[in-house]
Image (cartoon, helix red, strand yellow):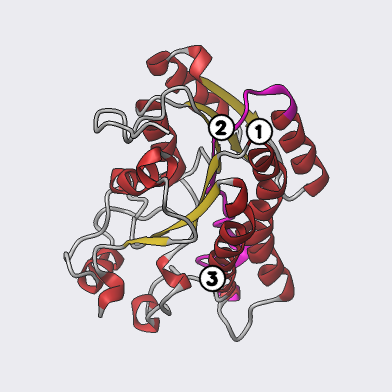
Amino acid sequence: MSVPISETLFSLAGKTALLTGSAGFLGQHMARALLRYGADVILLGRSGRIFEQREQLATEFGSDAVRAHQVDMYDLEQYEALLRQIERDEKPIDVLVNNAFDFSERTGFNSPVGRFDVSTYDQWLSCFISGVWWAALSTQIIGGQMKLRRTGSIVNISTMYAVVAPDPALYEDTTYFNPPGYPAAKAGLLSLTRYTASFFGPSQVRANAILPGPFSNIGGDTYNSVKQDDPFIERLKAKTALKRTGRAWELEGALIFLASEASSFVTGQSIVVDGGWTIT
């Protein structure tokens, strides 16, 4: 086996990546990063915005490099059928990025009814469906084909709250809130990552996780966005060693490292990208 030279160590040229949750705040930046490093990218998401995203990226990177599929991922039969269609009709998938999660009132985000003392079974179930099962199903189908081909990288997007608890003081007198099902599900995703790495490893398929910290969706128009001048941002900044929140592109280094041959001997690991939040 040849040793990658430095100029190609992080290259994704000739590879195809499937990215779930691609139209979300972080997903948009991940899609662009994968394309910029040479991969063809299949966008998969629940929102119709995915087609607008596809057109924008196709203009920049070429229409052959980007495909898009919209699906109601809560419709598990439809979601599974689409994954099998992609596995059957698209180029072999070399990189699977499980990024999708339902940041909405359905999972208890930013909602008084999402707090622990009043959270519901349905909220917890939605957290685990979107936080674990969506990734597990894509890993079964797409990762299963990787095993047959004896190559592939799976990158699961978890959260720093999979390894530390949220500080209740952050949310006092605000409308923002991380529901208890979110870190519980994302901790489960870390366990799934290690399980996948162990069982898929003999087939040379790697599985790793990225644990983002405070990456605020400033100025967005989504359910989970926040205004630039919101005092909540200052609370987040104060919790990090760098005294600022992350910029979305600052996840790209970890993503490209794990997706590429630069991490060819790395599996079952978690990279925390949190500005030093979890060190204290």
Q: Which mark is residue 190?
A: none
Q: Amino acid at mark 1?
A: Gln
Queried whether the magenta region covers residue 90, the answer comes back as yes
- List the residue tagged with mark 2: 43
Q: Amino acid at mark 2?
A: Leu
**Residue density around tag 1, few if under 14, some if 14–19, many if 20 or more, within 10 Å:** some
Using the rendered image of the protein, determine whether residue 96 is visible from the camera's viewpoint.
no
Q: Name the residue rendered at 24%, 68% in the picture.
A: 276
At numbered mark 3, what does the secondary structure look like: helix, strand or loop?
A: helix
Q: Name the residue rendered at 56%, 32% in the picture.
A: 43
Task: Pick the residue in front: 62 or 54.
Answer: 62
- Cα distance in 3D space between marks 2 and 3: 25 Å
Queried whether the magenta region covers residue 269, the answer comes back as no
Q: Are marks 2 and 3 in contact (CB under 8 Å)?
A: no
Residue at the far front in the pictured view: 1
Using the rendered image of the protein, determine whether residue 136 is visible from the camera's viewpoint.
yes
Q: Which residues are magenta?
A: 88-113
- List the residue tagged with mark 1: 70
Task: Give the number of the mark in front: 2 or 1.
Answer: 2
Task: Pick the residue in front: 139 or 224.
Answer: 139
Residue at the far right in the pictured view: 77
Q: Amino acid at mark 3?
A: Ala
- Cα distance in 3D space between marks 2 and 1: 8 Å
| Quadrant showing the N terminus | top left
Query: Up-down: is 96 above or below 246?
Result: above
